[in-house]
Structures are given as structure tokens and as C-alpha cells.
Amino acid sequence: MSPQQKVIRGAILDFIDDPALSGDEAWRYIEDGILWIEDGRVKKTGSYEELSAELPESIELHEYSHHLILPGFIDTHIHYPQTEMIAAYGERLLEWLETYTFPVESKFGDEAYGREIASVFLEELLKNGTTTALVFGTVHPESVDAFFTEAQKRRLRMIAGKVMMDRNAPDFICDEAEQSYTDSKALIERWHGVDRLQYAVTPRFAPTSTDRQLELAGKLLKEYPGVYMHTHLAENVEECAWVAELFPQSKHYLDVYDQAGLLSERSVFAHGIHLCDDACERLSETGSAIAHCPTSNLFLGSGLIELERLAEKGVQVGVGTDVGGGTSFSMFQTLADAYKVQAMRNRKLDPFRALYLATLGGARALDLEGCIGNFEPGCEADFICIDLHATPFLKFRTERCRSLFETLFVLNTLGDDRLIDTTWVMGEIAHRRDS
Ligand code: GUN
Ligand code: ZN
């Protein structure tokens, strides 16, 4: 069969490195560019002027004026079962879990219910331009079957796992160490590496796992190289004090996970706000990543992350929405809050670095560079077309921008789902705003 080819024409932006390390060498911008796709993957990018003569005459052409074409957003930490409890009033982390989260999550033993919520969740992600996410299920294996079934239907690259939690939570939401091992193993065998789906061993956080359960999580990672590890770390000061009490033999919070063998290039720790230098160094040495979730950190009053310290220590960082502790599915809204978190600390987050974190930074945090996150030839063609004229006011504001820097900062600050004109998955349209 002859290859399926198509071309997208418009302003194209992507990243080849972290602007915190390489400055302006980290990004590529082509004002009148083309993104040439073959069989769902990037064939090449370049200026229209340069490449138009090479294009086959009959090639499918999609033209976008007043748009910005960007790799699909990557959400490095989110909970699909919490879709229905986003914006729950008045609590900090530990009370919020007891009051709202555990009761909602108890419903996901019903696979049909899980599929209904997973479907709403995935449509919301696509509407917001997010094409890959690292996702918490619940303690029920059915929650993961439901999620992967819906993600597979949409041909999405998604990573998810069953929560492991065997203590310090109500019985109706707990598993038991050996059972959590067996259930996770069966899910890995069923889903890991099927189409674009990958599995993450998912202990909820140290306080809700016994030593035995964490040890078994480590055993799974040894038995299945390539499987991810996904948990929470040092989000809230009360949580940190509780961990110190529960694990007196550990040097610090991260050390609990380290002793169980849970740190690697495929490990992602949500939050990481309250970390000592030793913990930052261990994250860096092991290639583990932090998922920074600013809307959640502000909403739950958890704290202000020291992004520049993580960069100095060489820790991989991605961004996450952390729905439903987080308050938006939108990566733009998330980046707007990431900026405000740094502003509260008298620091800056420039728009290039912010968009890097939401694309290639996320791919690196998930050990998926070369697969997603930018427009290098061979990458999967997951991308978005952002409409600079999405609303009359955005048109008014962006027309007054005098540089790319300024335009990007306006998008990051004012953006939401209305800006996402089209979301493409493997070179096919998966969501169109106006349809
Ligand atoms: N720590 C343990 N569980 C959770 C959760 O569901 N959300 C957040 N934000 N933090 C957690
Ligand atoms: Zn979370």
C-alpha cells in the first residue's frame, strides 16, 4: 500500500532541549512552515518556501493561518476517577482525601461506570490539546481495564495503573499487599505495550502502603523492565510529618521509595514541593522525574515549588494538572498558575520554558523523547493547532504582540480550551472545536 501522506501548513513551534539549559537554541520556530506526515508519523518539517516544491501534487493539505502548531500537550500527573469531584470545597490534602476522594473512587469497581467516566475524561483531555497523560486509576483493576479500553479506542498514547493502597484508608478502598501484586501483574500482562498503552505501578503514596506493599511494587518493576512507577511525593507539610512518623528508619520521604527500589528513569513523582538536597540529588542520579502540578498546589494550599532548584540539581520536570486536586484540564491554565507560583517566590517562568515543560519536558519526564513531544522525524504525529483568534479579545490582544515571546506568554496566561482548534492523534483529527 502506498504511504498515507498529508501536510499541515502554519506557524510551527517545537523544542529540542530545555530552554533553562540551552536558551534560544532549545526551540525551533517556522513562521510559514509545513509539518509533513507519513503514516501517522512526522516525516519532516521545514519552511513552506523550501519544501513546497518537494510535495507530491495530490497530497492532502490543511492550511492554518493565525494558528500556532505545537506538539500535543503531555500531562504527567492526573487522576481520571476524580473527574467528577474537581472543585471540591474547603480542605487541605489529607482531609480532602478522606472527605471527597475515597468515597468517589469507591465507585470504580464497576467497569461500566469506569468506562463512562474515562470517556468524559479523555474527551476533555483532547478538547484541551492533551494527547498523552500519566494517569491514576483506583484500587480496582476494573478501573484500569475501563480506562485502557477507552484510550485504545481513541488510539491514544496513555500510561496508567491500578492504585496500590493497603493501609490508612477506609476498608472499602484498600487492597492487600499480595493481592495488589497479583492484580498489578495481571494488568501489566494484559495491557503494557498493547498499541500505545503502557502500565505504571502505582502505589498511592507512602502513608497508604505498608513496607511489604512497597517492596512488592519494587519486585514488579524488576520483573517488568519498561513498566513505569507513579506516585505522590512531599506535597504537603502534614503529609511529610506523617511519613517521618510512619517510616522512622528512612532518611527522608523519597528514601522510603528509594529503599523499595522505586527510583528510575521511568519513575514519576507528583509534586515534590518539600524536598531536601539529598532527595533532589537522588532524583537526579536515578533519572526520576517530578510532575509539577501548580493548580493543585494552590487549590489545596500545598506550597510553592522551587523550580530553579530542581533545574540546578538536574532533576527532570514535567507538568501535571492533577485533576481533581487540580482545578483545570487545560495545560494553558496550568502554565498560567505555574507562572503565578514562581511570581509568589519572586521568580520568573518564561513562556518558552513553560511550553517546553508541557511538551518535550513531559516526554523526557516519561522517558518518551523520540516518540512524542516534538517534531523530530519519526515521532508520532500527535499535535495541536492553537487559534490565536479564538475569541475577539484574544485576536485583539495577540495582534498587539510584538514578539513570539510576548505572543506565547499571552497564550499561556489567557489560554483555555477555546484556543484548541484541532487536536491530532497519529496524524488524524481526534477533536475539532467547532464540530
Ligand atoms: N496524595 C495521595 N493521594 C492523592 C491524590 O489523590 N491527590 C493528590 N493531589 N495528592 C494525593
Ligand atoms: Zn495526584
Image (cartoon, rainbow, N blue to C red):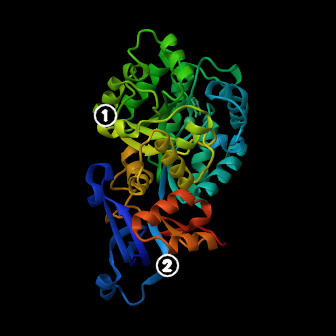
> Label 1 is placed on what type of residue?
Ser
Query: Residue 284 has which mark?
Result: 1
Q: In the rendering, at what x and y percent does residue 66 appear?
A: 50, 77
Secondary structure at numbered mark 1? helix
In terms of depth relative to the viewer, which is nearer, 290 or 427? 290
Residue farthest bottom in this picture: 57
| Residue at 27% over, 49% down | 21
In terms of depth relative to the viewer, which is nearer, 132 or 236? 236
| Residue at 42% over, 74% down | 11
Where does ligand 2 appear, by image quarter?
top right
Q: In the rendering, at what x and y percent does residue 13 appear?
A: 39, 66
Residue farthest front in this picture: 346
Determine whether 67 is above or below 116 in the image. below
Evaluate whether residue 178 shows in this view.
no
Q: In the rendering, at what x and y percent does residue 135 appear?
A: 54, 42
Q: In the rendering, at what x and y percent does residue 105 appear?
A: 68, 34
Total labels: the figure holds 2
Tell me whether circle 2 and circle 1 mark residues in contact (CB < 8 Å).
no
Q: In which quarter of the image is the N terminus?
A: bottom left
